[in-house]
Structure formats: C-alpha cells, structure tokens
Amino acid sequence: MTLKHTDTTEQIPGLEIVSRPGIYTGITKAQYHGNGLTPTLSLSASGAKTIIGSCLKAFWAKSPLNPDYEREDKKEFDIGEATHVLLLEPHDFDAKIKVVYADSWRTNAAKAERESAYLGGLIPLLVSDREDVRAMRKAVHSDPVAGKLDFDDGLVEATMAWIDSETGVWLRCRPDFLPNHSRYMADLKTAASAKPADFAKAMKNLGYHQQAAWYLDAREAVTGEQTAKFHFPVVEKKAPFLTATYTVDNDAVQWGRKQNRSAIRLFADAMARDEWPSYRDPADPWTPKAFQVKLPKYALTELEQMQEAGVFAEPQD
C-alpha cells in the first residue's frame, strides 16, 4: 500500500485546520504543535505520556490553548533532530541546519547565533556537532540490523489525525517516518547509551512503549491496516557511536495501549468539564482530597530488617 497515493493523504500548504481524519503532508512542526490544527484541542502521544506520567494540569500547561503557554526550543534535542534530518531527509540537511563556527556555546556570539537559528526555524549545530551527526548517520547505515530498515519508501514527518471511536476526541501523531508497507514502523532514537539494559529503562521512564502503541494504533485508525512490528534503532551520541535496534514486544505494546486509553479518557473528561486538575487519586480524579501516604515496600523491608537486628529494642533495666 503506497500511502501517498491513498485518499487519506492530502497536500495542504498553509493548513490551518484538519477538518477530517487522514494523513497530511505539508504541515510544519509549528502548525502541528500550535493551536488550530484540529477543530478542537487534540491529544498526541507525548500528551498522553504527560497525563499518565504526571497529571492533566501538567498537560494543560503545555497546551497551545493555554493563554500562558510559551513553546520553548529544547537545546538538548538539537543533535537528535539533526540526525533525523540527515537520515530521513539528507537532501534538506544543509537547508535546515545552521552551522555555528565556534568551539562551544559559551560565548555571547555563539549564543546569539543559536537564538537566531531558532527564530529562523533552523537547527543550530557547532561544527563538531555536525561531524558527530554525520558519523551517527554512517553508524546507523553500516549497522547490520538498523541499516536494513528502509527509510526511503514512505512519508517523512507526515501528520496523522483521527477521531477516537470511544470518546469522540481528536487524536494526532507525527511519526518521523511512515513507511508505505505495513511490515513495521520505526523511530530513530539518539541516546547516551544504546545498551539493552539502559534502553529498557528509558522505554519505561520515557514511555517509548506508549509511543509505539500510539503510532501503531494511529496507522490502523487512519488506513485500516495493522502493522506487524515497531522498531527503535538507537545510536549513541558520542564516539564510537554504538548502535542497536530494539523491537517492542507485544506485552509492552499492550501495556502502552492501556496507558494510552486511560489518558484519552481523562483527556475527554477534562475537555467536557473544562477542568485540568493537578495530582489526584486515579480512581477518583475529579475529587480534590489529601493523599494517604505509605512507606514504599523497600523502606518497610529495611525497617523490618533493622527491627530483627534489634535496632528498635527497648532498653533492658
């Protein structure tokens, strides 16, 4: 199935509102993250992770409908974004990157060039960072597993938007790459460590399994096709740029789906109530009340061991 030739794909320059579910190209990152993409506020994978990992108020603080919202460029993501561009859109790399000829970001001149790049919609990189990005791309292409993932046959940074069948709220996502086939979806990650144990921790802490479930379900909702697997090729950001590829197992995807479903329901309720509460009891998220705090199990075990050792014994007369 070639997505760019289906009825659900549209090219809409200067898009302001996505009026119906589908796959859209030509939407800028600013349009995707801004107010007005969908007829009502929509929920993304990152938003679902914020709701589940924190609370509705934390989500609302980052919402473009919030009058106090100010989107910030996260400088720690620049190298990762540049690597994605070089891997997925190598012909656009020079046009999307602003190379700053400085040894570091410490000088005022370098900082000013970086801010100027952000204002112009460019990714600022030091010369040394640009060379690292090139080396990371080479590492991915030369890896015996990651190098076999096809990032040529599909859509780069297409937007999928759809209406949740249960709650009626709008949902959205913007995969780095949406392949024309349904064998797999993949999302490149740059990391300090690509070691299996470290990526497993990152998957839990950063909700990568939720992201995988969200993207898989998005494609099925929009195209009617189920995708077999979700892969994360991971490349380290420092030499020798070690690379590994991870496939999210079915149990992790199912847990991600449960978390996403809970987030969607909370989001729908918040939209209906126009309430965005802070931390609440998951069983009763709309009633403000104090939490009853218990010691964590590891602390109870430690205290029991101390008691057995006689630490809390009453003094003998």
Image: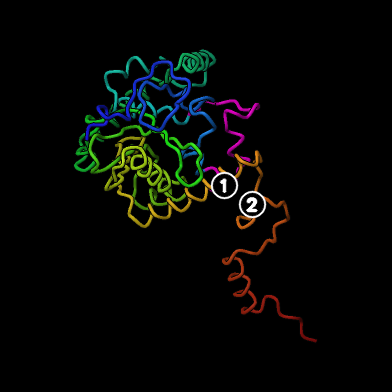
Residue 128 figure quarter: top left
User: Does residue 259 show up?
Assistant: yes
Residue 309 horizontal side relative to residue 261, left or right: right
Quadrant including the N terminus? top left
User: Does residue 235 show up?
Assistant: no
Q: Residue at x 68, y 61 (%)?
A: 293
Residue nearer the viewer, 13 or 58: 13
Q: How many marks?
A: 2
Q: Secondary structure at mark 2?
A: loop
Q: Answer whether residue 60 is magenta in the image.
A: yes
Residue nearer the viewer, 244 or 152: 152
Does the CB distance between marks 2 and 1 fall below 8 Å? yes
Q: CA distance from mark 2 to mark 1?
A: 8 Å
Q: Residue at x 39, y 47 (%)?
A: 213
- Three-letter code for the amino acid on which mark 2 is drawn: Pro
Q: How far across and how far down the image is residue 240, in percent?
A: 29, 37
Residue 290, compared with residue 6, is above or below; it is: below
Residue 132, compared with residue 298, is above or below; it is: above
Instruction: Single out the residue that lies furthest toward the right.
Output: 317
- Three-letter code for the amino acid on which mark 1 is drawn: Leu
Q: Answer whether residue 64 is magenta in the image.
A: yes
The numbered mark, 2 or 1, whose residue comes first in the sequence reads 1
Q: Secondary structure at mark 1?
A: helix
Residue 266 badge: 1
Q: Residue at x 61, y 66 (%)?
A: 299
Q: How far across and how far down the image is residue 113, in percent?
A: 48, 13
Residue nearer the viewer, 177 or 205: 177
Residue for badge 2: 285
Residue range highlighted in magenta:
50-75
Badge 1 local density, few (<14 within 10 Å), some, or many (20+)? many
